[in-house]
Amino acid sequence: MRLPYAVDRALVYAVALLLAAWVLVPLYFIGLAAFSTPDAAYSYPKALLPVAPSAETMRFFLDSRGVVSSIVNSFAVALLTIVIALLLGAPAGYALARFAFRGRDAFAVLVLTTKMFPIAILSIPLAVTFLQLGLYDSIVGVALVHSAMALPFVILVTSGVFVAVSHELEEAAQTLGCSRWTAFLRVALPLALPGLAAAAIFTFVISWNEAFASTILTLRSRTLPALVLTALDQSPITFKFAGGFVMAAPAIAFIFLMRRYLLNLWGGR
Amino acid sequence: MTTGRMSVRWRDDALPLALLGPAVLYLLLLIVLPMVQALVLAFQGDDGTFTLEHLRRMTGDVAFRDAIRNTLVLLILIVPAQIVLALVMALLVHSRIRGHEWFLYVYAIPLAISDLAAGILWLSVFTQNGYLNTVLQALGIIKEPIVYLSYENIAMVIGAIVIAESWRATALVLVILVAGLQLIPRDYFEAADLFGASRLRRTVHVVIPLLRPSLQSALIIRTIFAFTTFAAVFALAGRNLPVVAGEAYNWSVVARDPHVAAAYALVLLALAGAMTMVYLRVLGTSETQRAR
């Protein structure tokens, strides 16, 4: 049995919009809760529209002890992670895209396997090692672990990016007198920049969201997720709502910025 | 130029290895060394000899069996829900309906949201003074707010966690499935259309078999990740619902016992390792199928 075309279309769009609402409505609610007065956060029933927006809950969160410094730490860890992961990952991605060499398949398997390896769990034994090395409770220690988590993704995205940049352009530059290095620098790299930026953003996302390793490897130098996680037991609900909003809201921008590369990250197995 | 050519060829073999070397070394260093360290922590006594004491403390703990059971229950409830939801989303996006790019973007947003943040988002929905009760009361369905997240009603707590985790991690499955759908030639869909296959029959008989490799890898990746998530559980259930990763966290951060924590880490790594083995086998067979 077939439905009339118009009914069929209407049904498809209804399902699509319903699923979009399923994703967006909880984000709307946390925004509503984070930008209301603390009284409203405890009150019932809640306002379902932003009738009385207030920055009071947010200010309470930002004024709480350790919050601002944890946000600073989160940024510092994420930026350091981007530097390490791109410096190590982009050359590997380039090699994977450009060369047929012995061990290439083994390397591809290593990347795919480490992509899903739960590296954060390793922070438990690493905490002991880092204590001996003086890296415990430091931004560098957390960034080292986050870099290992991000590296497989950076390699996959950058290799996808460099595959899309034709090697013939680089070879043409070389016949015109560029060395291999300057051909890469002046031809391939500029064309690959948007993709590399997407890899950097995704690295930022991994680091910004990571709570397990950040908590286990720090004591005072908490990142934002580590601070919110360790405070879950004792913090008022206003603190949680504002913290949840600050952690989740950037996702809307992040996914928008890297929407063209989403399928590279997880697709292609 | 002939000698130059030789040297270029040599370099073309050495250059890729030089470019890969640092990344490989880094990954091995940060994976293999801590794994050895975990074994030492879990099996070495204070006097430096082999001991099963830490392992016994882990398995003897009241929360151990509960943690394993809860982790598996959550896994069994969450993963199928995600696969079905993601499949519907992926087919919608793939069908090129108007605005399909916008829909993919919206559906993918939770990909960049942590399980901790997702847990808190859904806490605002499920808490007693929260948005779900507000909406239900406004619709006249309930008269009094319902307590969803109480220790006395663990089934409802599990339901809330399943919803929060399905909400968050469906995006990951979606992206894998959309990428997989793009590998299927459009002709297959059109041929099914031509023979008058209804949407449901087309999905079951044409799309799902062709999508099997992607479904398998999504299943395995999600399973591994499900072993390691715990922050959404903490946010919604507090410490009332032990899960394996949460216990590892508790022994490390709260009890400050690196030995038992390391034993838990080994349990998680063994679970993930087993899944990775399955994954590699599946990958292997699908590669050989493709070669045929």
Image (cartoon, rainbow, N blue to C red):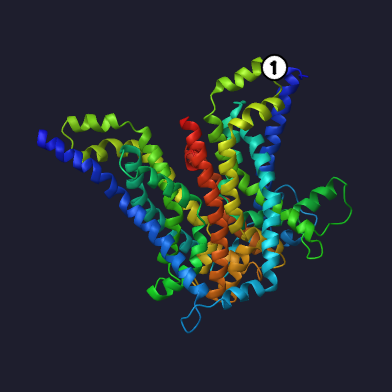
Q: Which residue is mark 1?
A: B196
Residue A34 visible in image: no
> In terms of depth relative to the viewer, which is nearer, B48 or B261?
B48
The structure residue drawn at horizontal position 63% and vertical position 63%, both measured from the top left corner, is B244
Q: Amino acid at mark 1?
A: Gly
* Location of residue B100 in the rendering, given as x and y in whole percent from the top left corner: 59, 30
Query: Mark 1, chain letter?
Result: B
* Location of residue A82 in the rendering, given as x and y in whole percent from the top left corner: 40, 53
| Structural crowding at the residue carrying mark 1, measured as other residues with C-alpha within 10 Å and reported as few (<14), some (14–19) or many (≥20) | few
The N terminus of chain A, quarter of image:
top right
Q: Is residue B180 above or below residue B225?
A: above
* Location of residue B153 in the rendering, given as x and y in whole percent from the top left corner: 81, 61
> In terms of depth relative to the viewer, which is nearer, B37 or B142?
B37
Classify mark 1: helix, strand or loop: loop
Q: Which residue is the extreme one toward the top?
A: B194
> In terms of depth relative to the viewer, which is nearer, A19 or A46?
A19
Taking the image as shown, residue A237 lies to the left or right of residue B103, namely: right
